[in-house]
Image (cartoon, rainbow, N blue to C red):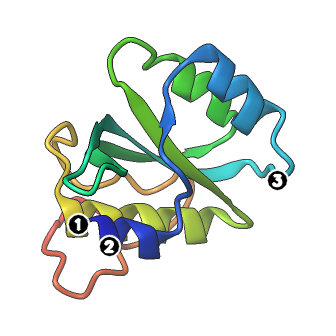
Amino acid sequence: MAEKIAKAGLGTPLPLTEEMIKEHVDNGEDWSSASVFVLGGIRKGKDGKPRFVIRRVSHVDGDLGAELRKHIGDYKGFRFKFFRSTRNAFDRECEIYHAFKPRKNKAPPNKPKNTKFTCPVPDCTFEGW
């Protein structure tokens, strides 16, 4: 599981706190209005390194910091990445959803408003697009 999320390129697991959101999201060097984030828990693996357990995946077309703040206290940690396009962010969200099936996601990702996007995962059978 750790190898899949590492390939997803969502960065280092961070504690979901106001301080971490300010430092890494609001004041980060990279910023875009399109982003993907995962929420979950951080625990030590057998090798002593932190392991991230994905509970929810989502994308944001807007203020990522504001969206993350809604979940402080509900999850221990987060990972994120900014993308240069809404399409790229949505595609990555779908890929992560299908790879990990996060238990807090009740259904596949919603396509962004005013788009005709469909899931890029070939075996997706969701018909709600």
Which residue, given by chain and number where applicable, does mark 3 sit on?
Answer: 30
Q: How crowded is the residue under tag 2: few (<14 C-alpha within 10 Å), some, or many (20+)?
A: few
Mark toward the start of the polypeptide (2 vs 3) = 2
* Residue at (80, 49) in percent of width and height: 31
Left/right placement of residue 84 relative to residue 125 reads right
* Residue 107 percent across, percent down from the top left: 18, 48
Whether residue 94 is visible here, answered yes or no, is: yes
Which residue, given by chain and number where applicable, does mark 1 sit on?
Answer: 1
Which residue, given by chain and number where applicable, does mark 2 sit on?
Answer: 4
Q: Residue furthest bottom?
A: 122
* Residue at (33, 64) in percent of width and height: 96
Work out how far the residue at label 2 is from the one at label 3, CA to CA, in angstroms. Answer: 23 Å
Q: How crowded is the residue under tag 1: few (<14 C-alpha within 10 Å), some, or many (20+)?
A: few
* Residue at (84, 33) in percent of width and height: 27
Instruction: Give the residue type at disc 3.
Output: Asp
* Residue 9 percent across, percent down from the top left: 53, 68
Label 1 secondary element: loop
Instruction: Give the residue type at disc 1.
Output: Met
* Nearer to us in this view, 115 or 25: 25
